[in-house]
Amino acid sequence: MSKTVAQRQRIGPQIRHLRQLRSLTLDDLAGSAGLSASHLSRLERSQTLPSFTVLANIAQVLDVSIDEFVQLEHDLQELDEQLAWQADLLALDENAYQEIVGLSIDTRRQLNHAIELLSNGHVSDVSVQEKLADLFATEESHLRRDDRIRELINQSGQNAIGLSRSLVQLQEIPGPRVGILNNPGLLPTAPNVDSMLLYRTLFPTLPLDPSVARKWHQWHNLANDEFPYDWPIKIIVHPELLQRVEHRFQNEQKLDGREVASKIASYWKQMLLSNQDFKIAIAEEEYGESNRLVAGNAAALFECFEELDSNNQNQPVAIWTSGTLQVEPIVKRVMQTWDNLPERATDPSRVGDWLEKHIR
């Protein structure tokens, strides 16, 4: 049996959309534009393309510029060329591609956008990493350093796709960890929290790298077992960190902010009781708004973003740094911060009470 080739959707659906917005029937528009209702119906279903004269008549009746239709057709041609290129890269056969171009215009646009985003979840530029290294080597003020970190993220950072990939890389690098956690995000969490749901809540319109999702799923499945942390971990936390987590997700339908904070607190408490190399300090001074975590002398990850609206989902949110020259000054400064903490900050009873307040 031969496979039917799908008809590419072009400007027909837009004509139908404009007709319906103006409460016109097929007969109304067809009669005013000088063509039959059956011809207009085929046109709206992308079974035929209108001549320039017919298109001009339709545009006049709908009170739109014909240039809008011409530009739409041009844009759709570029869109489908891009999809054809991507289908070739994905090793899809011609039949599969024909089915793709038979999808609605909006669906094709969304598919193309998602593939583009997944292909652009890049690692931070080396020059940005060098600026961060210099910042940690020279700047003494925590708050001024944090201002500059957030500025670099806004100017040259990764999007959430890049952040998720960097987070997986960081997790798998062996060596001690030291972190400073101030605000909700993907860094201040725990394996017993569903990372995919957390990501979907923070970035509802962005795709998620399937390889990252598989890793997160694997970690989540291990959450009830002894998680394989084979290296020392030290975390400095803002006193209001878990309250901020609760507040950030308090109005979400699929994610309960109090439950997320409770899961993080319970996991950290479990780690404190079972692993002498896991330590938490409650910050005695203000370190800023960004979250940061270093792994050995190999890598560092910085994260900072405000609550995002639906129109700004792809904004820069993180910077990934790797390589001894770039990471060593960061590790040195963060370790120095830990070593200079007052004894009260790491008092086990105080840390335990702080965690207990958030465990439901």
Image (spheres, grey):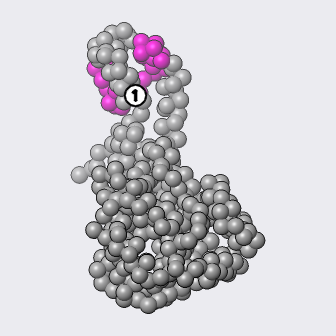
Residue 189: percent from left, percent from top: 42, 69
Label 1: state its secondary structure.
helix
Foreground pick, 114 / 135: 135
- Whether residue 263 is visible to the viewer of this picture, yes or no, is no
- Whether residue 357 is visible to the viewer of this picture, yes or no, is yes
Seen in the picture, residue 81 relative to 33 is either above or below; the reply is below
Foreground pick, 118 / 259: 259
Foreground pick, 118 / 254: 254
Seen in the picture, residue 280 relative to 125 is either above or below; the reply is below
Q: Main secondary structure of the magenta part?
A: helix
| In magenta stretch: residue 70 | no
Question: In the drawing, does residue 230 fall left or right of residue 257?
Answer: right
- The three-letter amino acid code for the residue at tag 1 is Gln
Task: Identify the residue at horizontal 56%, vertical 60% (top origin).
Answer: 289
Residue 135: percent from left, percent from top: 72, 68
Task: Identify the residue at horizontal 44%, vertical 90% (top origin).
Answer: 276
Magenta part of the chain: 36-64
Seen in the picture, residue 137 relative to 94 is either above or below; the reply is below
Query: Local crowd at mark 1 within 10 Å, few (<14), some, or many (≥20)?
Result: some
Residue bearing mark 1: 14
Task: Identify the residue at horizontal 34%, vertical 68% (top origin).
Answer: 358
